Image (spheres, helix red, strand yellow):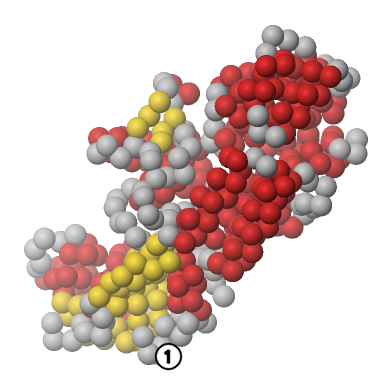
């Protein structure tokens, strides 16, 4: 490897893409193409970066297996940055196997780290944790070690384990200081701000207030009965009753929880559960049926009883009942939560992350665009959506992730 390539690689490792381009911008040999692609990725021109890295992989040829595998890893990272979550993961697995076979542990472990990041983005936390457990961060350079700790913190935040997240962020800061890359340090501080920002609204006894993630964790570990409108479940410290597939039952549970320790009138329950603007005997009959179903599902946690004007809920073991709601509630909050990371998302990537159809996501994006809450760039397959983050609020509890059961 000649001196200009070596110097350009060192500039990229230090987070100086312009310094790298000054040395190799006019070269079109395979190593220079690869480094130019990485430099363009660092500058934010992801489409050009992807084209350059692919050209480098072709230029290396079949005999340069390790170099081609490194190009695949670089392309996978560019795909993640552009939120191309449908990028074929099998290519990354094959590249990692090649790097492992040739003794390139640093890039092999980095390939595994990219897979963990992808799993985290699409909400597959169990798979992400298993993949992270297989990753050995020891050979990683400081910049990659900081990225590894950021992923560790991201999983901990979504699992609502604040102390684990803080410890990982502290390790990430130390690694970023050794790397000396300002952009990496800024990303770590952004995650730290998210961890400290309000994560939910706590509603109890007719009052509500914003709470941080640490208080949410304490609440979920307490003896209180929690109607969780962030994860659509009712739970106490020992039992979880998921209601994400029973929206009518959850709407009834939330209305009862917000009315506790009093009762919720029948017209309020009908409006929240069925959207009924007027009531007749058929509505009241349906309400009795749905309340009976809710009573059966919540039997391990609470009693649901009829009163003269409606229904009331009473915890079996807990002495306190609270409702945990999103800090900002609207129809398309889940889409906004993903867009709030500031990165450009395709509608297909959003559908994959949310576990829904692309058409459903597209309708939500069109509605958000009409309201001025989202905007698109590009056309056709290159179309991407983004929105500035909501200032002062974390999106942690809006992300698609299962509620911890213990």
Asked if residue 309 lies left or right of residue 145, the reply is: left
* Depth order, front residue of 17/125: 17
Asked if residue 152 lies left or right of residue 287, the reply is: right
Position of residue 177 measured from the top left corner of the image (x, y, whole percent): 68, 48
* Depth order, front residue of 345/402: 345
Quadrant of the rendered image containing residue 375: top left
Residue located 85% across and 42% down the image: 105
Residue 393 versus residue 257 in the image, above or below: above
In the structure shown, which secondary structural element does the residue marked by tag 1 occupy?
loop
Q: Quadrant of the C terminus?
A: bottom right
Quadrant of the rendered image containing residue 14: top right
Residue 68 versus residue 27 in the image, above or below: below
Q: From this viewpoint, is residue 327 visible?
A: yes
Residue located 57% across and 50% down the image: 188
Quadrant of the rendered image containing residue 241: bottom left
Q: Which residue is mark 1?
A: 317
Position of residue 361 measured from the top left corner of the image (x, y, whole percent): 39, 40
């Amino acid at each position: 490897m000649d001196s200009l390539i070596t110097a350009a690689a060192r500039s990229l490792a230090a987070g100086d893409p312009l310094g790298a381009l000054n040395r190799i911008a006019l070269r079109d040999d395979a190593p220079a193409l690869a480094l130019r692609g990485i430099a363009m990725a660092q500058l934010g021109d992801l489409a050009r970066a992807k084209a350059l890295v692919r050209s480098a992989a072709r230029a290396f040829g079949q005999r340069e297996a390790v170099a081609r595998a490194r190009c695949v890893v670089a392309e996978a990272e560019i795909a993640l940055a552009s939120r191309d979550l449908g990028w074929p993961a099998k290519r990354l697995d094959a590249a990692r196997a090649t790097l492992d076979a040739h003794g390139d542990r640093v890039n092999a472990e980095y390939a595994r780290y990219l897979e963990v990041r992808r799993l985290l983005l699409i909400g597959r936390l169990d798979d992400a944790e298993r993949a992270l457990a297989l990753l050995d961060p020891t050979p990683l350079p400081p910049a990659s070690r900081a990225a590894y700790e950021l992923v560790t913190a991201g999983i901990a935040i979504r699992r609502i384990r604040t102390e684990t997240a803080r410890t990982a962020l502290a390790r990430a800061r130390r690694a970023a200081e050794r790397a000396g890359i300002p952009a990496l340090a800024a990303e770590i501080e952004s995650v730290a701000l998210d961890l400290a920002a309000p994560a939910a609204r706590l509603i109890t006894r007719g009052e509500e207030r914003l709470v941080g993630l640490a208080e949410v964790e304490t609440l979920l570990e307490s003896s209180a009965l929690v109607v969780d409108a962030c994860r659509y479940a009712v739970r106490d410290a020992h039992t979880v009753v998921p209601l994400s597939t029973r929206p009518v039952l959850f709407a009834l549970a939330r209305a009862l929880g917000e009315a506790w320790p009093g009762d919720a009138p029948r017209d309020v329950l009908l409006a929240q559960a069925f959207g009924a603007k007027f009531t007749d005997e058929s509505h009241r009959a349906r309400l009795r049926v749905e309340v009976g179903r809710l009573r059966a599902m919540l039997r391990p946690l609470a009693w649901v009883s009829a009163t003269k004007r409606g229904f009331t809920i009473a915890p079996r073991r807990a002495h306190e009942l609270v409702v945990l709601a999103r800090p900002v509630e609207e129809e398309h909050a889940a889409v906004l939560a993903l867009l709030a990371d500031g990165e450009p998302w395709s509608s297909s990537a959003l559908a994959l992350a949310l576990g829904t159809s692309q058409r459903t996501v597209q309708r939500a994006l069109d509605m958000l665009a009409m309201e001025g809450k989202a905007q698109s760039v590009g056309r056709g397959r290159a179309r991407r959506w983004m929105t500035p983050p909501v200032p002062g609020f974390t999106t942690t509890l809006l992300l698609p992730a299962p509620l911890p059961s213990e």
